[in-house]
Every structure is written in structure tokens, then in C-alpha cells.
Amino acid sequence: MGGVVIGVIAAVFVILVVASAAIKIAQEYERGVIFRLGKYTGVRGPGLYVIIPFVERSVKVDLRVVTLDIPSQEAITKDNVTVKVNAVVYFRVVKPEDSVIKVYDHRYATSQISQTTLRSVIGESELDEVLAEREKLNQTLQKIIDDQTDPWGVKVSVVEIKEVELPPSMIRAIGAQAEAERERRAKIVHAEGEQQAAEKLAEAAKVIATQPSAMQLRYLQTLTTIATEHSSTVIFPLPMDMIAPFLEAAARAKK
């Protein structure tokens, strides 16, 4: 009787072991790549699926977006400036079978190709492009890396350069250049203002020349301004009518 019980328990144990090996569950974001006697047979999931124990093997692949941090890479730009650049890559698996069959470790492979591509692109760009045209470099990096990883079933969606580290001497040089540029712009703006003011004064002089009474009004306005700003100043106004004959005589003398 005891041997029968032991046999039943052993049979149940074997059934449970076989069942656990045969029944697989894939999450919504997972797929199971099936191999039968070493040969690829298809992709299963999500949900519950069954494989033949000891004959078939299932390799689960995560389809979620992976955030890959590219460590700081030292590179020399096209204009011979040494910089350190790091970036971040967002990618996901779109073909689970290729990510298992065609590459040993698709995450490690994507990381390595991202690092080498980052150094290569920085080396083909000048420092001004790295600093000012980062969006253009991001698009170039994304296209190159995506083309390299496409045979592995990996889709690279976004590549972003996070930080560009410059040598201290280059930072000081850029600061001096920026300061000189600001001074140049300030001088240009000041000169343009002087030019516009001179043009307006010339136009005002032409108007005053056609209307002699305008000079008298301007003279009185100047007196009002001076009296307002300097209340202790004593002013002796001289009517324009008194000096008008002298001005006319001077004009006739010139003729």
C-alpha cells in the first residue's frame, strides 16, 4: 500500500514538473521566441502558451522602450578641440526573433555602436556645430545608430546629447569672444542711434530754417527746460528781434 502511495506522489510530481516546463506566460510587453530542437519556429505571446518540454525552448524578449545612457566619451572635433560628450538613447525591440537570432546581446551591442557613433559624429563636426546645432547632431546620431541596429530588430527612436564638457582654457576663450561680440554689438547700436539722431536733427533744422518763428519758440522752450532743471540759474533772455537785423546784415554780406 505504501509503495502505491509513493508511486502516485512521484507521478504527480513528474506531471507538475512537466506542466511547469510546458506552460509559459508572457506579459503584455513580452514575446516568447520558440526554438524546437534548436530551430526557430515562431513567436508566441502575450498570455498563456504551451511548449513541448525538452523539445522546445522559449526565450522571452522585452518590447518596452529602453533608456540607454551613453557614458562620457572623449573626442576631438574637426577644428582640433578636445571635448567630452555624453548622451542618452531610447530604443525598443520591434522584431523579437531578430534580437535573439542575429545578435548575442542586443542591449550591449546597441550601447557599443552608440558610443562609437557618438565619437565619430563629434569628430566630423566643428566645435560651433556641437554647441549651437545640437538638434542637427541628434538627428544624425539617431539615423546612423538606427541603420546599424535595424538588422538586429531594434528601433532607435531618440538620441539626445546631454552635456558637452570643454577644457577650462576653451571656456575662457569662448567667454572672451562672447564679451567682445557684445561690445561690438553695443558700439554698432550706439553708432546707429547717433546716425538716426543726426538725421532727425538735420530734418528739424530744415523745418526751422523755413519758419523763423520756430527758432524763437525753441529758444523759449530751452529756457523753460533750464529753469526747471536748474532753479538757481539766472537767465537773461535776449529777444530774437534784437539780433535779427545783425543776422540779416551778415547774410547780405555773404552774398
Image (cartoon, rainbow, N blue to C red):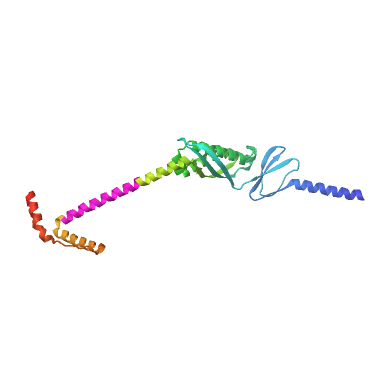
**Which residue is painted at 9% across and 56% down in the image?**
246
Callout count:
0
Image vertical order of residue 31 relative to residue 215, above or below: above
Image position of 211 (left or right of 93):
left
Q: Nearer the viewer, residue 64 or 205?
A: 205
> Furthest residue to the right?
1
Q: Can you say whether 35 is above or below 186 in the image?
A: above
Where residue 139 appears, as percent x and y from the top left, is 49, 43
Give the percent coordinates (x, y) of residue 224: 22, 63
Q: Quadrant of residue 105?
A: top right
- Give left or right: position of 148 versus 229: right
Most common secondary structure along the magenta stretch: helix
Front residue of 148/131: it is 131
Q: Magenta span has 144?
A: no
Q: Position of residue 245 (x, y in %)?
A: 8, 57
Hey, which quadrant is residue 151 in on the image?
Answer: top right
**74 or 152: nearer the eye?**
74
Q: In front here: 165 or 176?
A: 176
Residue 207 is covered by the magenta coloring: yes
Residue 150 drawn above or below residue 223 = above
Percent from the top left, x then y, of residue 212? 14, 58
Residue at 63%, 49% in the rendered image: 29
**Magenta span:** 184-208
Left or right, 121 with reference to 100: left
